Amino acid sequence: MYSALELTNRLRAEAGRVAESGLPLEVFPQRVQEIIFNLATYENFNIEYSAPIVLSAVATAIGNACQIQIKGNWRTSPSIYMMLVGRPGLGMTPPLSFLYRPIHEQDDRMFEQYLQKCDEYDRTLATASKSKEADDLLLKKPQLVTTVISDFTPEALMHVHQHNLRGVAIEVDEILAMFNSVKRYNSKNNLIEDLLSAYSGRPLKSIRKSEARPILIRQPCINVIGSVQTNLLPEVFRNEYKANCLLDRFLFVYPNDQRISKWQRTDRNTPRPATMRQWGAILNRILNLPCPTNENGNKVCSLVLNLAEDAEAYFYDWYNGIIDTVNAVENDAEVDSRKTKLDGNAARLSLVFQILKWAAGEGHMQYIDLDSVKAAIRMIDYYEDTYRRVQESIVSAGIGDNKEAWLSLLGDTFTAGEAVIAGRRVELSRRTVYYALDKLSKEPNSVLEKLHHGTYRKTSAIASCTIALSSEGKATAPAGQSAKVQCATDNTDER
């Protein structure tokens, strides 16, 4: 028996054809679904952006207050790296600004408190100086506590996190600017390395001559979210940013429907729902979760939630299936390193869904239940589907320009390894080559025939080889993309 709210949400999902997008919106709490639908109706926000941003905002609000125990000694905070992909004008920034607003408002309150403490500090210091007691007075200079940062240096990121052990969030309108910042200062910029370490839960340490004291963050929790236009994707995936390990950890949001929704007028006499008040009540409940530290104030004592027995069994069975797929690959070059990172993101999302259900009044905070794990895995499937389309958009554009030159370097019969070597000569990444081999051997009137594992032969249709991939590239990828494509998952790394 459905509740009135659940029935309404189902009807709105059917009317909005949400199922066609592939987004499993039904795994969200009913109150949150209602908020997302209202944002689509009254703010014209794209549902495929709003729902994932909800998870990012919740992960940021939780921070180090809660962790999930995955297996053995492996536990993690909800550190989520997310990238919103779309054409210009599709509306990625408005839902990001709206759904992060309660966190920004908290930052504003902490900034006002910081200014007040600075005024008190200055007055006390001035009074002590006049009375010649400054040397005897021990004053602790106020430090700004904030959560969201946008324009920053790696050193600033460390300082902000040092004074907010709960965690920080990097929120940028154009995430390419963050990657470009790696080369903005000098070769010693270690932003990428810091983000990799933070995601894996390894301590962050900064020891520099310019700093009065070294910085040590024992339990980092950094969330990242930003947008990128589809025509700039090749720039994000370039090797020069040394981000090929980092992007394996990103969750990509790339809506199926890239059309901009038309504005719809609503009756001004009809009361509009208090969407921000409703969302603020949910997110502020999470922000108010305690995040205690040890007696020295330098280490967080997180609330750790375990997986329920049935949830653990489901989670392990799901990931063991992925392990079986990876183990079945004989050629190391063909191993998809991204698959080996899915367990971390699935665990984080399981924690996020559990806390979100509690905050919406539809769950508890005693442990991670089976529904939360299933919801997380459903979202992982969605993210991986969008990631596949992102990759196809990039590699289709790249191979479309270089395909003929690449094929001309190969004999009538060749191996996948020889194709990769030839690909390097025309600046095609390994993943692009493997995608091309698969695509060109499966298309109608294919130009390649797969003889057996890792061996291919050119067919009589090779003369018309400009059709198979270049046509798809024109259909799915914006014009002007660079042909010099490097994929984020060309190399493997530790979890």
Image (cartoon, rainbow, N blue to C red):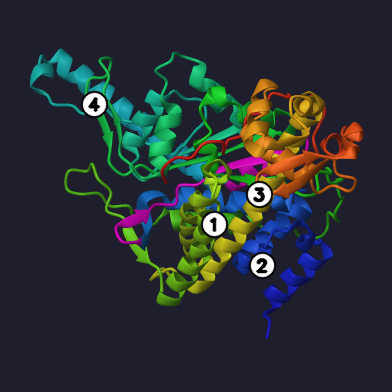
Spatial CA span between label 4 and label 2: 47 Å
- Whether residue 363 is visible, yes or no, is no
Q: Nearer the viewer, residue 282 or 313?
A: 313
Whole-percent x, y for residue 444 in the image: 89, 48
Residue pointed to by mark 3 = 453
| Front of the two marks 1 and 3 | 3
- Residue 410, percent across and down? 74, 29
Judge left or right: residue 15 versus residue 406: right
Q: Kindly report the distance in space between the C-alpha atoms of the residues bearing marks 1 and 3.
A: 13 Å
Q: Which residue is labeled 2 in the image?
A: 26
Q: What kind of residue is marked 2?
A: Glu
Q: How crowded is mark 1: few (under 14 residues within 10 Å), some or many (20 or more)?
A: few
Left or right: where 88 falls relative to 241:
right
On screen, 362 above or below 41? below
Q: Is residue 350 magenta?
A: no
Cα gap from disc 4 to disc 3, whole angstroms: 53 Å
Q: Which mark is residue 364?
A: none
Q: Residue at x 45, y 76 (%)?
A: 310
Give amino acid for label 4. Answer: Pro
Looking at the rendered structure, the secondary structure element under dot 2 is helix
Sooner in the amino-acid sequence: mark 2 or mark 1? 2
Disc ID at residue 214 = 4
Disc 1 designates what residue? Answer: 328
**Which callout, 2 or 1, points to the residue nearer the camera?**
1
**Tag 3's secondary structure?**
loop
Camera-side mark, 4 or 3: 3
User: Mark 4 falls on what kind of element?
Assistant: loop
Q: What stretch is highlighted in magenta?
A: 71-99
User: Which callout, 3 or 2, points at the residue further toward the start of the chain?
Assistant: 2
